[in-house]
Image (tube, rainbow, N blue to C red):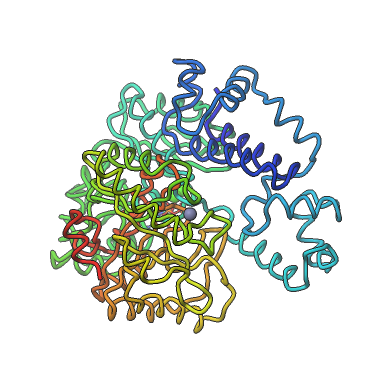
């Protein structure tokens, strides 16, 4: 069966190659393919199953899939090929996917490098850059050449670990399938995935089953499996499509809790809990908690922690970062719960670089269970993202008022993602901003400034009385871009002094603030919000990753303002 990951990759390849071939003219067409790729990659159901059940009509119901794309998906499902993609690949024989992860090397650059230096792969690019041959290509300089080498280096370092959003849907899909295997009583993806770490090394399944052999058979024969690396009577290790490793271990029911505790980790947390066991004259391992030969706990995690004199500890904070000491005193913080957000304060519409109308986003948010969203289209200096100017923003306020009159059950707040300029000023005057319900500000350019100047830009924005929230305050893209250098402690101080809110951007490739910064901010009393940064109706689902990040940073419900109803939220802002 054709896998979602393969389909998504084919869509992304077509988008990229279309742009390589046709340049700017193709941008719209390419975007449609990128959107389809994103949608397919984050679907929980197999596209091939949808097609099997409902045919092309079913495909057309998937957001961002129109007739032309549906036809290509059908062809791929039926024949395993996509002629259009094969033709493009023949014309442009470049390993495009090798370039995807490298920030700043888009289709235009790839084309230029191919035309001038016949570069077809990342390895060839690296060689050319280190030999100083790039600087002779129009548009390149020695500095740009060095920059590319640095980016390739950063990319290689992150390789092997995958960002959680790329793994999570598949991992949960397999978990659900395991639960349906006959005789399976329990199945869960443990390890870093259960701890909701921002990147995942491999997936670790733990299963309780009457017949381990049956589970093994099922696991190694899943359609996603590319290679079976190892297999024993109750243990298997496979490589899934896309180079993702997964382990599976079947354990007896009486060991479920202790095995889950062991395989959830982190290793550092496990080592510490084991020490506590020893100090109590107990022995803790995957199979249980033992006093001499007698098992005193093991069937549930709660029992295991209890036998050690500890509160049960949520997986997201099992990092041996102080949680064990507090669990001993029964003083763990009450972490913000999944599903507790009432609104989303960073949402884009097609009026800048989003893909849906304001109304479509509002309806999708309502369906997702939110009470309000802020529409935060980009502002004018971000021309690339279709930023709005003063007049367009004012018009948007009227349009939003009109939508609110019509739409029940969800409130749209007028807002903007205002661009912070090089000197820390904003690209919108305060008399316009003050007409908005909420103002978010973010850095989108001049990433190469030194740390003190960069920090000052954010501090100045925080001091601006119009600015309520600093959006994605470090600018990183996990595994792709380091973000700009910033003294986060100073930004946190400034946020506290000025009652400015800091955002946890829930988009899984951003997730700034990272967990330790969340913890630093919340501990100081800085208020946070968790936003999806949605550019598409299905992106509200990303909020989960932001809540996970907040939990990893020990944030409680009262630390996160968009757990409040609309009126209270608006009062709490500057
Ligand atoms: P990952 O896969 O790199 O994202 O991180 P984890 O935490 O999933 O680590 P992994 O897959 O190597 O192992 C899964 C869990 O098994 C880990 O969280 C804790 C446990 N574990 C693995 N190796 C050791 C070890 O040497 N000692 C102890 N105490 N636990 C271990
Ligand atoms: Ca793992
Ligand atoms: Ca593992
Ligand atoms: Zn945007």
Image quadrant where residue 299 sits: top left
Does residue 51 appear to the left or right of 345 in the view shown?
A: right
Of residues 334 and 206, the one drawn nearer to the viewer in this rendering: 334
Residue 571: horizontal and vertical position, in percent? Answer: 18, 64
Identify which residue, 211 or 245, lies in the foreground.
245
**Residue 208 location (% of width, % of height):** 31, 34
Position of residue 108 in the picture relative to residue 401 (left or right): right
State the residue at coordinates (43%, 55%).
Answer: 377
Nearer to me, 425 or 15: 425
Q: Compared to 48, does 381 lie above or below?
A: below
Look at the image and tell me whether residue 548 can be seen. no
Residue 570 picture location, percent across and down: 22, 61
Quadrant, the N terminus: top right
Q: Which residue: 80% across, 34% down?
A: 90
Q: Residue at x 30, y 46 (%)?
A: 260
Q: Is residue 341 visible?
A: yes
For residue 552, above or below residue 75: below
Q: Is residue 438 above or below residue 296?
A: below
Residue at the (79%, 40%) spot, across then down? 92
Q: Is residue 535 above or below residue 394?
A: above
Question: Where on the picture, by quarter, is residue 360?
Answer: top left
Residue 55, percent across and down? Answer: 49, 15
């Amino acid at each position: 069966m054709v896998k979602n990951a393969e389909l998504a990759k084919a869509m992304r390849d077509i988008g990229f190659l279309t742009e390589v071939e046709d340049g700017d003219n193709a941008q719209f067409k390419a975007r449609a393919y990128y959107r389809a790729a994103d949608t397919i990659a984050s679907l929980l159901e197999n596209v091939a199953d949808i097609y099997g059940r409902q045919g092309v009509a079913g495909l057309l119901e998937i957001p961002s899939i129109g007739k032309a794309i549906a036809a290509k998906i059908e062809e791929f499902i039926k024949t395993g090929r996509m002629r259009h993609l094969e033709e493009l690949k023949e014309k442009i024989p470049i390993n495009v996917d090798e370039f995807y992860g490298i920030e700043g090397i888009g289709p235009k650059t790839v084309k230029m490098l191919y035309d001038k230096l016949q570069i077809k792969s990342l390895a060839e690019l690296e060689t050319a850059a280190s030999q100083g041959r790039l600087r002779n290509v129009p548009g390149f300089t020695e500095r740009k050449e060095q920059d590319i080498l640095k980016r390739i280096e950063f990319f290689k370092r992150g390789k092997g670990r995958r960002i959680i959003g790329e793994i999570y849907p598949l991992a949960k899909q397999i978990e659900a399938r395991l639960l349906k295997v006959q005789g399976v009583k329990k199945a869960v993806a443990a390890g870093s995935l259960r701890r909701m770490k921002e990147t995942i090394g491999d997936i670790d399944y733990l299963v309780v089953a009457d017949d381990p052999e049956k589970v093994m058979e099922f696991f190694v024969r899943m359609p996603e499996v590319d290679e079976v690396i190892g297999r024993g009577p109750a243990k298997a290790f496979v490589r899934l499509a896309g180079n993702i490793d997964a382990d599976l271990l079947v354990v007896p029911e009486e060991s479920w809790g202790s095995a889950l505790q062991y395989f959830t980790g982190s290793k550092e947390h496990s080592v510490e809990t084991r020490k506590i066991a020893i100090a109590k004259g107990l022995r803790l391992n995957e199979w249980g908690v033992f006093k001499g030969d007698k098992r005193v706990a093991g069937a549930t995690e709660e029992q295991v922690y209890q036998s050690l004199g500890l509160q049960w500890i949520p997986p997201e904070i099992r990092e041996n970062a102080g949680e064990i000491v507090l669990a001993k005193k029964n003083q763990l913080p009450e972490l913000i719960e999944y599903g507790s957000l009432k609104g989303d304060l960073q949402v884009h519409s097609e009026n800048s670089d989003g893909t849906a109308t304001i109304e479509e986003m509002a309806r999708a948010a309502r369906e997702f269970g939110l009470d309000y969203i802020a529409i935060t289209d980009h502002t004018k200096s971000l021309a690339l993202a279709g930023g709005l100017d003063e007049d367009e923003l004012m018009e948007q306020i009227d349009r939003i008022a009109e939508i609110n009159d019509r739409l029940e059950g969800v409130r749209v707040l007028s807002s903007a993602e205002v661009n912070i300029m090089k000197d820390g000023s904003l690209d919108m005057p305060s008399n316009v901003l003050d007409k908005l319900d909420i103002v978010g500000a973010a850095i989108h350019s001049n990433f190469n400034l030194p740390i003190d100047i960069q920090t000052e830009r954010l501090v100045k924005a925080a001091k601006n009385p119009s600015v309520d929230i600093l959006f994605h305050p470090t600018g990183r893209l996990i595994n792709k871009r380091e973000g700009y250098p910033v003294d986060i402690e100073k930004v946190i101080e400034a946020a506290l002094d000025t009652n400015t809110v800091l955002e946890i951007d829930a988009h899984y490739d951003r997730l700034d603030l990272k967990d330790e910064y969340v913890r630093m901010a919340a501990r100081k009393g800085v208020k946070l919000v968790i936003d999806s940064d949605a550019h598409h109706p299905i992106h509200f689902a990303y909020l989960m990753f932001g809540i996970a990040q907040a939990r990893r940073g020990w944030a409680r419900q009262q630390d996160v303002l968009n757990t409040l109803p609309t009126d209270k939220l608006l009062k709490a802002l500057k």
